[in-house]
Amino acid sequence: MYSIAPSHSLIWPSCFTMGTYQPESLAGATNSDNDDDESPIEEVRLTVTNTDDPTLPVWTFRMWFLGLFSCCLLSFLNQFFSYRTEPLIITQITVQVATLPIGHFLATVLPTTKFRLPGFGSRLFSLNPGPFNMKEHVLISIFANAGSAFGNGSAYAVGIVTIIKVFYRRNISFLAGWLLIITTQVLGYGWAGLLRKYVVEPAHMWWPSTLVQVSLFRALHEKDDQRMSRAKFFLIALICSFCWYLVPGYLFSTLTSISWICWAFSKSVTAQQIGSGMRGLGLGAITLDWSAVASFLFSPLICPFFAIVNVFAGYMLIIYIVIPIAYWGFDLYGASKFPIFSSHLFTSQGQKYDISAIVNDKFELDIGKYEEQGRIHISMFFALTYGFGFATIASTITHVALFYGREIYERFQASYKGKEDIHTRLMRKYKDIPSWWFNTLLLVTLAVSLILCIFLNNQVQMPWWGLLFASAIAFMFTLPISIITATTNQTPGLNIITEYVMGIILPGRPIANVCFKVYGYMSMSQAVSFLSDFKLGHYMKIPPRSMFLVQFLGTIISGTINISVAWWLLNSIENICQDDLLPPDSPWTCPGDRVFFDASVIWGLVGPKRIFGTLGSYSSMNWFFLGGAVGPVLVWLLHKVFPTQSWIPLINLPVLLGATGSMPPATPLNYNAWVIVGTIFNFFIFRYRKQWWQRYNYILSAALDAGVAFMAVLLYFSLGMENKGLTWWGTNGEHCELATCPTAKGIAVDGCPAR
């Protein structure tokens, strides 16, 4: 899937547009001499089989047990890790790999005795209906995927509960938080189901990212006779990852960010700004902590090298060219008064902005207090990040229109005119989902959402018309964005658009703004993910009703666990998310929620007019919209003038401009490690040890994720809850305390040298 930062990133150009797994028997060959038995898309022909066995059992005890367990575990782990400095998202691939040997084990030990259940007539059931099959495995993975918010980690709306309780220090009830999470996660399913015939059934809507999953399922279920089986390799790698994380996770936490320039120049503010991996530009910063490698950007082992190159090029351009020129060269917006890399909000004199002072008793902006404290200022990096976010929005629209517009149009037309392909014909054997299921789900979810906005309005602030407006925006964009994703594997987001619109319409209400953003953006995102999983089920020949029930139940269960874990952590960890009050080695700094909070202040409480409009200091950032829109046009014209230059179409400006879309909360350390590890595995090992890569690459990624997750949870329950920590040089952070200091003369900040 794609990673979406909580505040402002628009698009994560997918790390899954990668070469699909092609067994030797299929590579370069077709599946049948009959054209009717072939997909019109070559990648699909080479990846997805044209056969189906409808007799394979899917509603098995194994599926329910492993599906429920995986969903609950992923929901717990992803919410638990979301508050940590280096959050780790446990993805569907980890479940795919980990549940395979367990499924085979259950198929070996469970009794095969058949029995009847009351109410089911003469139908016979068994805990063990036969060998563990691929369809069970697919349903387990989809069940678990709902537990990771379809690959995005914990439910997006949990951030609203967090910022209300931690940053604004107000109250929201558990019921209101639960309703908010469940409705935002489920709302888009209603209309997504009705769009299946447009973006799931047509062969030309091929959803490239799903082919990675199909490839991995086929690879895992092929006969495995080699000495080092995938299951054995997974177990060994998991144990190694589990044991090693004890070192950076507890004994020697400085290994998480080895910023050696800070150590060499312990008295220099500028050197630490350049060298700090977590608070500066991260030049030379490295890590020996897998959670730092895979945080925010997902595992680099599952991202193809060309995508890594694009991200690296954009990252280098923004971090090591644009930011230094803007900060040290031109001192734009008085940049030297503030830290070079920070997501905090500041006064004009470089002090932390007291947000609580400008919020009145009605949880709205106090204009008098705001004018007394002055305009809000942000770091140069944070301002440019928003600017590049604006450019990414515009460039995505023009890039997709110019480079993919004809393809999207032709494939959408073909989806109407073309014959049903083999996969759609095979799926006709199964009972389809009645339309009233989706209509009922949509109406019930909308009704519950309206009840939340009307009767609990004092907690969520959003008026009823805001809910309807947000739902209309999401519904309107779901089909075109689904078509773009299904044909190009790029998924534009609506988060910036929704928060910008609501900030103009209803400024001064921070929670109303984030609720509008979540309803408008997340319901669309969930709808697209729902359709993507349906396409996976389409390729794997999973009965549609089974798909729907697993997705729906998984979403309800995961949302409930997300809010429960969040509620527990927010009420049990002292000063959680308050990085200025926590010890240097504390993992509970909540970088994603900090950015989510800042976004609520910028777009909701203060409003875009007072930040990026005529009443703010950063109105020139709006020019990035124009620059982003024009950029792809220039690339397209170059391609037309020099059609023989094959490298020109590879210039993907949405990728380049959106490369740092996860920053903040991601840091240069995360990008450095991600690029290095990704290059090693997806360039060198892929090129020179391709057989090893094909066999073990995904398995290693899953094992590293799982090992870190289990050790981190063990450390928290065994040591963290009792506050049993080590205190020595190696647990005192990255030793770059001066990286957060301003460089302007006359600006006095505690802990920083006077200038």
Image (cartoon, rainbow, N blue to C red):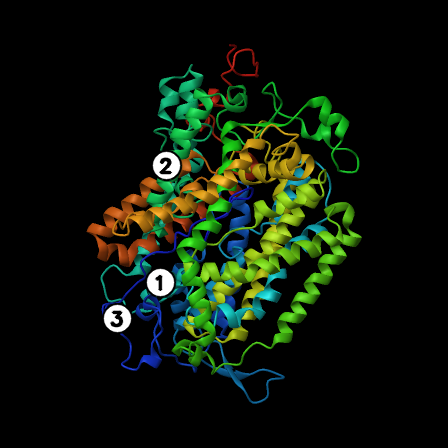
C-alpha distance separating marks 3 and 1: 15 Å
Q: Nearer the viewer, residue 656 or 702?
A: 656
The percent coordinates of residue 49 (x first, y second) are: 34, 74
- Provide residue 549's location: percent of width, then percent of height: 57, 70
Residue 425, compared with residue 479, is above or below; it is below
Q: Which residue is mark 1?
A: 216
739 to 48, vertically: above or below: above
Q: Which quadrant, please, contains the N terminus?
A: bottom left
Q: Taking the image as drawn, is residue 64 in sight?
A: yes
- Describe residue 560's horizontal placement relative to residue 223 as left or right: right
Closer to the chain start, of discs 2 and 1, is: 1
Tag shown at residue 26: 3
Question: Circle 2 is placed at which residue position?
Answer: 672
Q: Is residue 205 visible?
A: no
Identified at 46% across, 50% down, the residue is 398
Q: Position of residue 485 (x, y in %)?
A: 46, 59
Secondary element at tag 3: loop
Separation (CA) of disc 2 from disc 1: 27 Å
Q: In terms of sequence position, does the residue under pointer 3 or pointer 2 come before the other?
A: 3
Which quadrant of the view contains residue 195?
bottom right
